[in-house]
Amino acid sequence: KPDQQAPDARSATGGPSDDRAQQGAYVTTAQGVRVSSTDHSLRAGARGPTLLQDHHLREKVMHFDHERIPERVVHARGAAAHGTFVANGAASSVTSAGFLAEGVETPVFVRFSTVLGSRGSADTVRDTRGFATKFYTADGTFDLVGNNIPVFFIQDGIKFPDVIHAGKPHPDREIPQAQSAHDTFWDFVSLHTEATHHTIWNMSDRGIPRSYRMMEGFGVHTFRLVAADGTTTLVKFHWKPRLGVHSLTWEEAQMAAGVDPDFHRRDLADAIESGAHPQWDLGIQTFPDTPEQTFEGIDLLDPTKIVPEELAPVQPIGTLTLTHNPTNYFAETEQVAFHTGHLVPGIDITDDPLLAARNFSYLDTQLTRLGGPNFAQIPINRPHAPVNDMQRDGFHQHAVHEGVAPYRPNTLDGGCPFIAGEDVSRYVEAPVTVPEAAKVRADPTSPTAAISFDDHYTQPRQFYLSMTPVERTHIAQAYTFELGKCYEQAIKERALRTLANIDTDLCLTVANGLGLEPPTTGALEQPEPSPALSQVGGAWPVDG
Ligand code: HEM
């Protein structure tokens, strides 16, 4: 449809050379040779055998045979849209990032997703949602690869394969296909109790959003912003939907999954096509960049903890508007490659051990998923900034590089741009001091929040207690339903012990629903709650 031809989409999906396959009025082979018929293979007589010499048949079927690429190992099911981000300038005091300066408009591509289901799974399952944004800034591409839940299941990325193995369908029966209602999931989260916080968000109404347009988004990790004068500030990123946060009831989610498994992607595409362009404000919580990297006793390197908004208000720094649907799902939504390591000057990472693993994982997986090292050249992944790198050759190389000296400095290809003068827009890592310490495989600890990493229950408890009665009922029903799908009694009992450490009533209600005796002891091997975390109280910043 003409109104779906986004100007951004056109530039993101490239110029005339990318339209090569659809030029001219006639059907041709991939070599541009006009064919006499694309409906009939070449045969020896109308009823005779099909001939191997039919190069058009062979080329057509060969290409079809290879149309599929591997789906993402997680977040396989998604829907995306183009839009614009306009900064209000409020972040300029803490970051030199050019696209966050007042009034700067940046084209973006946003992909929403579920985490566990396969590409063909239903939209309205109980799950975390991905909220990944690619900012095509003038200084290169910045990706904010977030979720709709502000915390994560694990504190160290080395456990990511494990938590995903536990959440994906059972290897024997390949069920359930997209939900957390099974033994391996509950086995994992009751043994790795750091997952308790993320799990209770999943069991709350946040796990079944009404619409992608009505979800918050979170960068989850603490990032480090760098100002023009080199000062650094720790931040957490938040997306706040202008439509507010809304959820489905469990019954609505079940019905939608049956009647319209494409409920969320249809909702997003229809809204954008009809001109109801969804909007989010991007905000930051800021924290002083102290050596401890803690704030009010909360360890900022721990992705299983939030910082309550009453302690650190979210300051709006710009607004995102989604304006155009993709014109081709495969070219854009499927081939887009987000990466937490796609950073621009003024934005840096912290030593959150979950983030460290992500910074390895995204490029690594895309190498396989997108067939080699040149996926940055795929139109949707092309930066909107000049690219002048030293990468050469490789599978699916589209660039025809000029010159003979792909190294710097050189004296053959016209100078040494990287050593000729200061370039103010270059990326410089914040010169953070790395502690002198012995190598160790252990939870990160800091002097002021030594047991914050080990406190797995204070924040889940505060989350639960901040809920309204009807929201608490939904949470208890969700635990009861999902745990009710487990076959192993021992896993249900261990999960109940975890619940006992969150709230006695919640535990009793779920035990009752499952027809089990409530546990007489709390969860296994839990230390006392961290005093620092316990001081944090009051209303939770959830408005859904
Ligand atoms: C994909 C978010 C943790 C590995 C994604 C996507 C999102 C996301 C939104 C989908 C991107 C898209 O739409 O294409 C997060 C968040 C995390 C987290 C918020 C924790 C705070 C991790 C960790 C790892 C990881 C710890 C690995 C150690 C992956 C992989 C993909 C993925 C392999 C598929 C990427 C692709 O095929 O292009 N993640 N993730 N994630 N994530 Fe994460």
Image: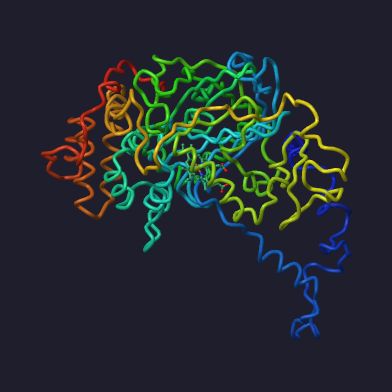
Nearest to the observer: residue 193 or residue 500: 193
- Counting labels gives 0
Which quadrant of the rendered structure holds the C terminus?
top left
Say left or right for 448 vs 47.
left
Image location (x, y in percent) of residue 43: 79, 81
Q: Quadrant of the N terminus?
A: top right
Specify whether 520 is left or right of 6.
left
- Please tell me in which quadrant of the rendered image residue 342 appears: top right
Image: 236 above or below 72: above
Q: Nearer the viewer, residue 291 or 298?
A: 291
Task: Say whether residue 428 is left or right of residue 293.
Answer: right
Q: Is residue 41 above or below residue 210?
A: below
472 vs 274, nearest the viewer: 472
Image height check: is 86 above or below 134?
above
Q: Position of residue 237 (x, y in %)?
A: 51, 25
Q: How is the image coloured?
A: rainbow
Q: Where residue 186 sits: x, y (%)?
A: 30, 47
The residue that appears at 69% across and 64% down in the rendered structure is: 64
Vertical comparison of 299 with 187: above or below? above
Q: Is residue 73 left or right of residue 92?
A: left
Q: Quadrant of residue 317?
A: top right
- Please tell me which residue lies in front, 513 or 466: 466
Q: Can you tell which quarter of the image residue 439 is in?
A: top left
**Residue 276, position as x, y percentages in the image:** 62, 26
